[in-house]
Image (tube, rainbow, N blue to C red):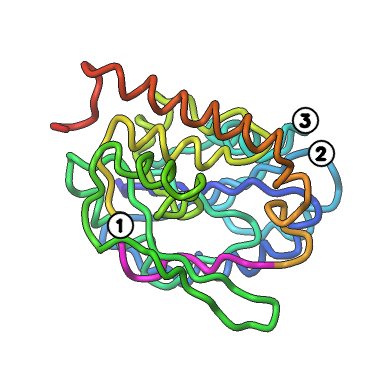
Amino acid sequence: MSRIITVITAVHAPGAEYLPDAYKSLTEQELPDGWVWEWVIQEDGETDSVTPYVPEDDRVSFGQGRVGRAAMARTMGLARARGEYVKVLDADDMLTPGTLARDIAALADDNLGWVTSRVLDLMPDGSTVGFDQDPPAGPIEIGAVLDHWKAHDYRAHVHPATLCTRRELLLALGGWMALPASEDTGLLLALNAVSRGWFNADAGLLYRKWPGQVTGQAAHAHPGEREARMAVVEARARALASFTGWRFGDA
């Protein structure tokens, strides 16, 4: 029987038109022998706008539900996830060739709970821009992400949109945080509070920049909401870190 890596995508109507690009990036993935991918797409809402962009492929499942933003949509999608690893892919982003194979290779180490990779911002004109503060390729120790995030105005040195993690660890942590934004950062810090991770220096994601991008809207940077989000993200990570008897692997 094949082993499965689940790619999970939350989508809302404005970003649905980019699903074919995300799908193309999936079909171009070459996996190790014995592995297959499945794509779980969950709409944040129940409209008629997303379905036309969902590919007809037995490896793809599509679901809808009440509006609750990306965290709830992804967590609802977990009900259909069969993979032992879960990879997040935003609807408007694209994987680079080899990304899933590199994630699978890293998680062959039983003492690692999650993987991230380098990101290239995909600009509207088709050019790409990298991040100049990527960490070295290799392991990321417990607590390292929180330390960097706290010291750099709530900006982590690894990108949560590239996360691939063990399904049982994701479920144990309750999925993505129930926040209007920064839900993936909250998950990243929670994972790093209880497990070591890995950073792949090869670019693993094209992170699309476009006018309708949720993180580009004014509400995303509202000072009061942002401070509240960051406070609860940090509090959760520190609470998890204080439970010294619970660590993943030999960490």
Residue that mark 2 sits on? 46
What residue type is disc 1 on?
A: Phe
Q: Assign the C terminus to one quadrant of the image.
A: top left
- For mark 1, give the secondary structure: strand
Residue bounds of the magenta highlight: 200-209
The residue drawn where x is 38% and y is 35% is 167
Q: Earlier in the sequence, mark 2 or mark 3?
A: 2
SS at mark 3 in the image: loop
* Residue 153 placement (x, y as % from top left): 51, 47
Tag 3: amino acid: Arg
Where residue 246 appears, as percent x and y from the top left, is: 25, 20
Q: Residues within 10 Å of mark 3 (few under 14, many from 20)?
A: few
Determine crowd level at label 1: few under 14, some 14-19, many 20+ residues with C-alpha closer than 10 A: many
* Cα–Cα span, label 2 and label 3: 7 Å
Q: Which residue is mark 3?
A: 66
Secondary element at image label 2: loop
Tell me which label, 1 or 3, sits earlier in the chain. 3
Is 57 drawn above or below residue 25 in the view shown? above
